[in-house]
Image (spheres, grey):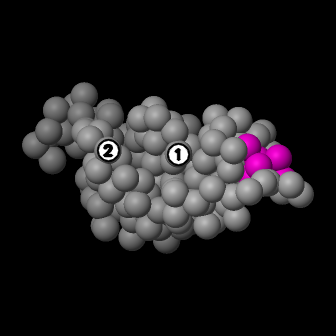
Amino acid sequence: MLWRRRLDPGYRPADAIGLAEPYAAELSGDWRRSARLWGEIGAPFEQAMALMSGNEAAQREALQLFETLGAQAVANKVRTQMRRSGISNIANGPRATTRANLLGLTRREMQVLKLVDRGLSSKRIAAELDISPKTVDHHVAAMMDKLGAHTRVEASAVARDAGLL
């Protein structure tokens, strides 16, 4: 019943007897409760599916969850739904090169990682890439966050173990 409703918003089931509570909540139109329940039991995909029925903030949260899960097809559906409803400033999501990277690093983050691995400072990396040291620091922070590393040396080790370097 729920999937029929998701695929056909005009569908109204007679009842939701026997359905699990999060499904029943969504079917009754209570997307907030459904999303909360899915979140509580650790089902982020279903949580995002419930959030898709919500307001702009909920749809943005759904989009973020789908992106985090790597569910690109559904993320694209959310973007289309948001655009059709007049919502603007919708992120396009990661580029194909970023999605293809084993650890989700952007092209620039990979460039910075290779220079970090060579032991270069932010100032030297900035000169090498013709960007500001502050921008380098932003790339380093993003790269380390994606790698789950606390130091530059640890980031290099994680990348080596993953076969990126």
- Residue 24 belongs to the span the image colors magenta: yes
Please determine whether, in this image, residue 162 is positioned above or below residue 43.
below
Report crowding for label 2: few under 14, some 14 to 19, many 20 or more residues within 10 A (C-alpha): few
Residue hosting label 2: 85
Please determine whether, in this image, residue 2 is positioned above or below residue 52.
below
Picture quadrant of residue 99: bottom left
Residue hosting label 1: 53
Residue visible at 42% across and 46% down in the picture: 143
Q: Looking at numbered disc 2 in the image, what kind of residue is underneath it? A: Ser
Residue visible at 71% across and 35% down in the picture: 33
State whether the magenta stretch is mostly helix, strand or loop: helix
Q: At which x and y percent is residue 29?
A: 63, 42
Residues 148 and 157: in front is 148
Q: At which x and y percent is residue 146?
A: 49, 48
Q: Secondary structure at mark 1?
A: loop
Residue visible at 18% across and 39% down in the picture: 126
